[in-house]
Amino acid sequence: MDDTESTTTSADENTGNLLDNPTRDTLAEGLLGFLKPTVDQLDDRVRATRISQLELKQQIESLNEELQNVRSALNDHPDLDPYVKKLISCKHKVTVVLNVLQASQDRLNEIRRVVNKEKRVRTAVLPEAAPQEPEQGTSAEDSFLLIDALEKDLEYLKAKNPVFCLEVGSGSGIVITALGMVLPQCFCISTDINRNACVMSKDTASYNKVVLDACNMDLACFFVDKMFDVVIFNPPYVVTESEECRRTDITASWAGGVKGREITDRLLDIIPKKLADDGVFYLLLVQENIPDEVVKIMSGYGYKCDIVIKRKVRNEQQLVLKFYN
Amino acid sequence: MLTSKCLKGVMTGYPLAINATNIKVTEVDFNPEFITRVIPKLDWEVLWTAANSIGHGEGLPKILEPKYEDNEELLKKVHRVLLEVEIEEGNLTCPESGRQFPISKGIPNMLLTEAEVQ
């Protein structure tokens, strides 16, 4: 552009000087003719430059537009915000769920701990074969087994026509009461080391109109000899520490000491003395009491043995043995 | 009353003397066959003494006659004293040791102390 201007200025100066001289016109014309292609060329160049300038401008404008787009894209990114918000709320939710899970886990652990503790206490008190609820629950089940055994043997008992029937450790009294009901011609006596059990036995019997005398005593120690035609015993058969089977409270209804047989063995020793010569003795045992040993002890006293009934109750093999001469 | 005739003291103390402070009489169905079968199992003299000691011996002969099983009146009296007369409160005394066993609400307490068991 600078070139074009300077050329234009010098041409003007030349043109001014040549106006007054006609010869100069020819020169001017010649000069003009000489310069014209150059001027035209310059003109073309200028035009071309202008066009390229315009093109450049357009380019710059479009670039500017692009830049503005980039800038606006950089300045505000509205699309990301909701996603970020969603992610944050998601994180919250995960945290909450995690907390809930943690709390649940803690609770489960606590429950497991309590269960284990309970289990430890139970196994300490009632080893493997122990019934779940020694106080009332399962005692009913072994009582029913004993009643079933007596029922199974009812023809035999009726033929025997007993006068005195004794249940040792009668507890609630349901077994001796059941016997009294099917054998109205006999006199029923019960013993229990626990006085409340004696009261309960008497109540059970009188409710069912059975005449029953209950005595608060250990086994059958105070009865005159050879008195009983039928003796029934549902012993405390749970294997426990020896100390535990020397009590007279509710523990006495299940704690059987070594092999669950300490109490049973004491009764076995006095059975030959208390049982009439043609008497019969029904004894409930569980497998842990080693029934074979009991059979051996009794055969030593000259008794024969039959298994009247067997039943598995909650993994506990219960059976009723019958000893007679 | 029947049971008390079946009890003895710690060793052989028999019969236990009865001291009744409260006697209850309840009616029980009379079963002559049962009474006939019980009588030979009991010591008649012991029964007679005991019945008199509690004031219910009236009508009972001191010596049991043979063929008692045909004597319904006697059987009824025995039935009464054995099954219907119940000692509610009182105690039983061992003739040997003098040890007393209390009877409360019809239930004799025959439990021994640990010292007695030794």
Image: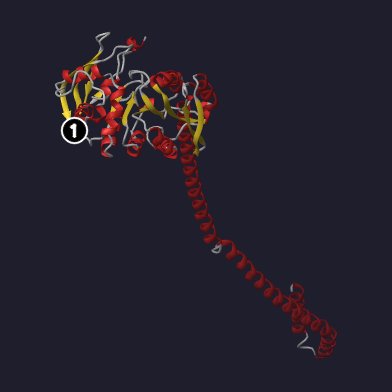
On the image, the x and y values in percent for residue A76 come to 55, 63
Question: Which chain is home to disc 1?
Answer: B
Horizontal and vertical percent position of residue A270 = 42, 18
Q: Nearer the viewer, residue A240 or B12?
A: B12
- Tell me the crowding category of disc 1: few under 14, some 14 to 19, or many 20 or more residues within 10 angstroms, Cα based: few
Residue at the image position 49 percent from the left and 55 percent from the top? A89
- In this rendering, position of residue A212 left or right of residue A149: left
At 23% from the left edge and 17% from the top edge, which residue is drawn? B45
The quarter of the picture where residue B37 lies is top left
On screen, residue A48 above or below A322? below
Q: Position of residue B97 (x, y in %)?
A: 27, 8
| Total numbered labels | 1
Residue closer to the observer: B102 or B94: B94
Q: Quadrant of residue A247?
A: top left
Query: Is A78 left or right of A247, judged from the image as shown?
Result: right
Q: Which residue is mark 1?
A: B26
Q: Is residue A1 visible?
A: yes
The residue depicted at 32 percent of the width and 11 percent of the height is B12
Q: How is the image coloured?
A: secondary structure
Which amino acid type is marked by label 1? Thr
Q: Quadrant of the N terminus of chain A?
A: bottom right
Using the image, determine if residue A227 lies above or below residue A4. Answer: above
What SS does tag 1 mark? loop
